[in-house]
Structures are given as structure tokens and as C-alpha cells.
Amino acid sequence: MPSLWALEITNALLAGERGGRLRPGDIRRFVNLVYGLPMLQETLQIESVLTGVLPLARERGLSAYDAAYLDLAIREGAVLATLDSALRKAARREGVPLAAAR
């Protein structure tokens, strides 16, 4: 996963808490689940962002953040898990396999 994933998760937890959808106990349980996941975090390098992410974002009309996930999935031959419809569409066009939406 791109290194920005941790910030996105943190932002989602904060938004849920501020919006009254999550309580501190919910967040603690989620954090414990995340710690148990077998994840590798990729550090984003400016060169790979400018040569890989930027063109992909332009071509597919994605934000740089979404293009970073798609770029990583392309390079690693990984399955992409997202509910974002624009990102799912771009992944299909790039031939990236998608995790089943629930």
C-alpha cells in the first residue's frame, strides 16, 4: 500500500468519530485489527510519483491519491480493493483485478 494509506485511515476514523458514527472503543478495536493485518507499506518516491502516478491520474481522471493505489496495483500485479466507482472503472481499463465489492 502507498504510505498515504495510514493517513487516509486516520482521517476516516476521525471523520467517523466527529460525525458520531464511531466511539473511542470502536476505533480501538479497528486499530487492533489493522495491527494484525499482514501489510507492506511502500514509501512514495517523487520520481515514481511524477513518472507513474501523475500520467495515470491525468489519463484516467483520478486524484493523485487514487492514482497512487492504482499505480501500485499495476506494478505489483495486485488486486485492488476499493468501493470508489471512478477508481474501479480505471482499474478495469488498466486490467487490474478488483476485490469483490460488498
Image (cartoon, rainbow, N blue to C red):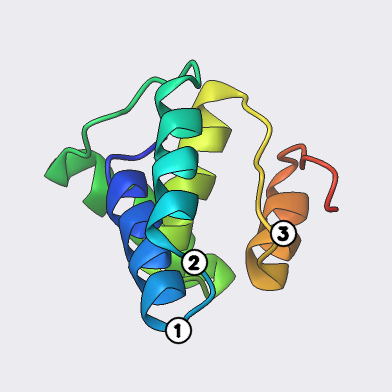
Residue 9 at x, y percent in the picture: 39, 53
The amino acid pointed to by label 3 is Arg
Left or right: residue 44 versus residue 60 is: left
- Is mark 2 in CB contact (under 8 Å) with mark 1? yes
Name the element at disc 3: helix
Mark closer to the chain start, 2 or 3: 2
- Is mark 2 in CB contact (under 8 Å) with mark 3? no
The amino acid pointed to by label 2 is Leu
The nearer-to-camera label among 3 and 1 is 1
Mark 1: few/some/many CA within 10 Å (<14, 14-19, 20+): few
Marker count (numbered): 3
Identified at 49% across, 15% down, the residue is: 38
> In the image, is residue 50 above or below residue 81?
below
The amino acid pointed to by label 1 is Gly
Identified at 25% across, 40% down, the residue is: 48
Residue nearest the observer in this picture, 73 or 81: 81
> In the image, is residue 19 above or below residue 7?
below
> In the image, is residue 21 above or below residue 101?
below
- Residue 19's disc is 1
Mark closer to the chain start, 3 or 1: 1
Residue designated by label 2: 22
- Residue placed farthest to the left in the image? 46
Q: CA distance from mark 2 to mark 1?
A: 8 Å
Identified at 39% across, 43% down, the residue is: 28
Mark 3: few/some/many CA within 10 Å (<14, 14-19, 20+): many
Mark 2: few/some/many CA within 10 Å (<14, 14-19, 20+): some
Q: CA distance from mark 2 to mark 3?
A: 27 Å
Quadrant of the image occupied by residue 77: top right
Residue designated by label 3: 88
Left or right: residue 26 versus residue 50 is: right
Residue 69 at x, y percent in the picture: 47, 47
- Is mark 3 in CB contact (under 8 Å) with mark 1? no
